[in-house]
C-alpha cells in the first residue's frame, strides 16, 4: 500500500522552490541512513539509490522519467561510450559495476541527486524521514517571534551576535570577490591550484566541490595516475592539457591536467556565492 505523505511533507513533494532551498543539505542523508556509494565515494548507481530508499528499481525509474529535468540538474548523469569506459576503468570494467560487458550506458547519482529523489519520492518511509529532517532544518532557521519582553531582549542580543558573526564572515569572503575580479580580467585558463589560491580555499576542497556538483569525475591513466575530467555538459568550463609521460614499463602514456576556463571560473564563483561561506578548515592559512 502506498504511503500518503502528511500535509507538511507536501511542501517539499509539491514545491520545487522549497526543494531548491534545501537541496544543499545532503548531510541529512547520513542522519537517516548510511548511503552506500561506489568505491570513488562520490557516485551511486540507480540500484544503490533504490536500495537506500527501500523501493524497487522500477519505482525509481518511474520517478526519474516523470521528473527527468530536476534530478539531472542536481547531478544525475547517464554515462555512455568513452565516458562510461573511463568511469568504469578504475573499478576494473563495467562488469564490476554490476553491468553486462555489453552495457552501453550507466546512470549515476551524486549526493544532491540522491537527496532530490528523497524530496520527491512518496512511496518510501526512508524518503519521508529524509523530508522530515529537511523540514526540521528549515523550521530551525525560520524567524522566531518573542512571546515576552524578556524573550525579545534575549532575541535581540542573539541577533546582534549573529550580525557580528555575519560581518566577520563577509570580511573573510571579501578577498574571494576581489580574486574573482582578477580572474575574470585574466582571459587565460588556469590549473585548479591557481583558482583555489586566488579564492583562498584549499585545492582539494574546491576539487571535492566540483565532484559533488557533478561537474567533473575521476579516472585513471594507464599507469594508474589519478586524473580529473569534465562531464560533457561542462566542457566549456574546463580544458584538458595533455602530456606524454615516459615510464620505464609503459610507452606512450598520456596524462591530462584539468584546467579551468574563464567561463568556468565565473561559473564556480556564481555557484559558491549561492552557498554559505565555507567552514574554517577549508580556508587556506597564510
Image (spheres, grey):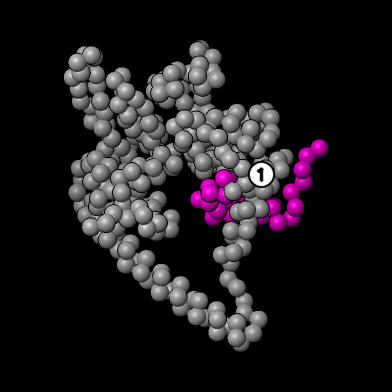
Q: Where the C terminus falls, by quadrant?
A: bottom left
Q: x and y percent of residue 203 in the render?
A: 30, 45
From what the image shows, is residue 48 above or below residue 92?
below
From what the image shows, is residue 238 above or below residue 12?
above
Q: x and y percent of residue 18 in the render?
A: 59, 54
Residue annotated with mark 1: 127
User: What residue is drawn where x is 59% and y is 58%?
Assistant: 137
| In the foreground, 278 or 85 | 278
Asked whether 196 falls inside the magenta stretch, the response is no
Q: Main secondary structure of the magenta part?
A: helix
Which quarter of the figure has residue 151? bottom right
User: What residue is drawn where x is 19% and y is 15%?
Assistant: 248
From what the image shows, is residue 68 above or below residue 148?
above
Q: Which residues are magenta?
A: 1-30
Asked whether 24 falls inside the magenta stretch, the response is yes
User: What residue is drawn where x is 58% and y is 67%?
Assistant: 142
Q: Where the N terminus falls, by quadrant?
A: top right
Q: x and y percent of residue 10 in the render?
A: 69, 52
Amino acid at each position: 500500500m502506498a504511503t500518503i505523505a502528511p500535509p507538511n511533507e507536501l511542501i517539499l513533494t509539491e514545491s520545487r522552490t522549497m526543494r531548491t532551498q534545501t537541496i544543499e543539505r545532503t548531510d541529512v542523508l547520513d542522519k537517516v541512513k548510511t548511503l552506500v556509494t561506489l568505491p570513488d565515494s562520490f557516485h551511486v548507481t540507480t540500484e544503490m539509490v533504490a536500495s537506500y530508499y527501500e523501493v524497487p528499481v522500477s519505482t525509481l525509474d518511474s520517478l526519474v522519467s516523470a521528473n527527468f529535468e530536476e534530478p539531472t540538474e542536481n547531478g544525475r548523469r547517464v554515462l555512455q561510450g568513452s565516458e562510461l569506459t573511463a568511469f568504469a576503468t578504475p573499478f576494473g570494467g563495467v562488469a564490476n559495476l554490476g553491468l553486462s560487458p555489453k552495457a552501453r550506458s550507466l546512470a549515476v547519482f551524486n549526493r544532491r541527486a540522491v537527496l532530490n529523489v528523497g524530496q520527491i519520492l512518496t512511496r518510501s518511509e526512508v524518503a519521508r524521514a529524509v523530508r522530515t529532517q529537511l523540514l526540521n532544518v528549515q523550521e530551525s532557521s525560520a524567524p522566531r517571534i518573542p512571546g515576552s519582553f524578556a524573550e525579545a531582549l534575549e532575541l535581540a542580543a542573539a541577533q546582534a551576535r549573529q550580525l557580528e558573526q555575519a560581518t566577520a564572515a563577509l570580511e573573510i569572503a571579501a578577498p574571494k570577490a576581489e580574486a574573482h575580479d582578477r580572474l575574470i580580467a585574466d582571459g587565460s585558463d588556469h590549473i585548479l591550484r591557481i583558482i583555489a589560491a586566488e579564492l583562498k580555499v584549499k585545492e582539494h576542497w574546491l576539487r571535492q566541490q566540483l565532484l559533488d556538483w557533478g561537474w567533473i569525475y575521476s579516472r585513471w591513466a594507464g599507469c594508474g595516475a589519478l586524473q580529473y575530467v569534465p562531464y560533457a555538459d561542462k566542457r566549456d568550463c574546463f580544458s584538458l592539457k595533455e602530456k606524454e609521460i615516459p615510464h620505464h614499463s609503459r610507452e606512450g602514456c598520456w596524462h591530462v591536467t584539468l584546467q579551468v576556463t574563464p567561463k568556468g571560473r565565473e561559473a564556480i564563483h556564481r555557484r559558491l556565492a549561492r552557498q554559505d561561506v565555507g567552514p574554517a578548515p577549508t580556508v587556506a592559512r597564510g
